[in-house]
Amino acid sequence: MLATTESQYQPDPRTPELGNEFFDVVQPAKFPRTTLRFRNQRWAERVGLGHLTQEDWANHFARFAPLPQNLPAPLALRYHGYQFRSYNPYLGDGRGFLFAQLRDPADGRLLDLATKGSGRTPWSRTADGRLTLKGGVREILATEMLEALGVYTSKTFSLFETGESLVRSDEPSPTRSAVLVRLSHSHVRFGTFERQAHDGNVANLGRLCEFTIEHYFPALAKRTESGPAALFHEVCARAAALCASWMAAGFVHGVLNTDNMNVTGESFDYGPWRFLPHLDPMFTAAYFDHSSLYAYGRQPEAVRWNLERLADALSPLVPKAQLARSLVEFEARYLGELSARLLARLGVAAADPVSDALFGARALCFVQKSRVPFDRFFFDWYGGEAAAQRARRSPHGAAYTGEAFTAFRQAIADRAPTRPQALGDAYFQGPGPTTMHIDEVERVWEAIAQRDDWAPLEQKISEVRALGQLLQLAS
């Protein structure tokens, strides 16, 4: 359950401890209008902010008056990053800032409330520091669907329409503007370390490692290996789990630059994302990714490459040989996590690592060769052999016969359902899966853009949350 109470609001602003070489104090933009379009009451209740009135909500999350006992002014964070594998030393929060930090009353995590579209900063370069309303709506849809599918993701916390007209090359313009607040478990990016390494500031690099361990991985302080090595090992493990969860969800992030990956293994910052219609390893989300560097099937390679760059950044603190084991283990960790997540999405029990890996490979091989829609396959066979009648009724039932299907059918035959109570739910008696394909996203936006009709967005969120409640996939 997410719900908590007002008394559980636990402010804990920690980033200032790093020192002003890690951020710039900035002022938020002043918007001509603040019309609330989305309020994540579930997570507001969880972190003790559910009691805020509508005016208080606007005051804090559109005008950015400080939360009680929290950061007195917003902080634009400084970082670098490899963008499509070219190093960029001119990055930083260019249209966002860290607004507040607080503890999750449920598990003690340090959480950030940060923005997107809140105005220009020293890192905006030639950009206007704004977010389009369509971009905000797309981020809501991405985070809601990923959360439902068990991906460890940031949460879209708030979205206000701000009454400005923006010109963009990738949207019909002028287009409407918005400011978004997301709730995240850290904005310490791979690029945060890269900046200090690039500048040769070993003292700051060490301070950043100590800060990260203290506030995000306190259990690492008890490890016998060096702090940076222990930290890197943990980051590698979390990155493997994150990547596996994307693959099992059929999700393509689109822009896996090192500034878009953080140390806690949480997915965040959604731009040209897509969900797979069919399993195609070369399916690419970003129209500007001309070489398909970040295609669906290349995401594990991209994450591994980014971890290598993080190892480079940490090398002034620890010999790279001490980091090599964690890199070598990445593939095995990733494959193990992928098998577990595929089994969970199909709602069937695990057995042993070897047979689970074989099961996962057979499932993905069948889905790719058969061209059964990705989400449809998991809908049709949720619960394993207990779903055979449902699968036969599917519009793709013909694919579930013959030699091509035999290997998967044999692999699933002895797998017991993990949540048999879910099999009788109305969802699995319905016409098909809840999905988030690009045509659906565009229909939601079209209703808003043409008629200012927000009902399709609200309906989609309701359907996705119902799916998450039914599947109960861990994130």
Image (spheres, rainbow, N blue to C red):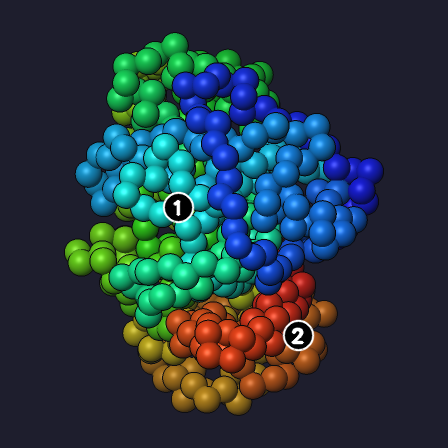
Q: Residue 321 location, x and y as percent?
A: 29, 19
- At x 72% / y 70%, what residue is drawn? 421
Decide: few, some or many residues near mark 2? Use Cα within 10 Å; few <14, some 14-19, many ≥20.
Answer: some
Q: Residue 235 location, x and y as percent?
A: 44, 32
Q: Is residue 198 above or below residue 431?
A: above
What is the CA distance from the residue labelled 2 to the residue labelled 1? Answer: 47 Å
Front residue of 196 and 433 = 196
The residue wearing badge 2 is 423
Q: Is residue 465 above or below residue 68?
A: below
State the SS at label 1: loop
Q: Residue 136 location, x and y as percent?
A: 48, 58
Residue 192 shows in this picture: yes
Q: Which mark is residue 75?
A: none
- Which quadrant of the figure has residue 126? top left
Decide: few, some or many residues near mark 1? Use Cα within 10 Å; few <14, some 14-19, many ≥20.
Answer: many
Q: Give amino acid for label 1.
A: Gly
Front residue of 264 and 172 = 172
Most extreme residue toward the top is: 203
Q: Give amino acid for label 2.
A: Leu
Front residue of 52 and 193 = 52
- Which quadrant of the figure has residue 38? bottom right
Callout 2 touching callout 1 (CB < 8 Å): no
Q: Which mark is residue 129?
A: 1
Q: Is residue 10 above or below residue 40?
A: above
Q: Residue 441 location, x and y as percent?
A: 45, 71
Marks 2 and 1, the one that precedes in the sequence: 1
- At x 46% / y 53%, what residue is drawn? 245
State the SS at label 2: loop
- At x 49% / y 18%, what residue is drawn? 18
Front residue of 158 and 236 = 158
- At x 50% / y 86%, what residue is drawn? 394
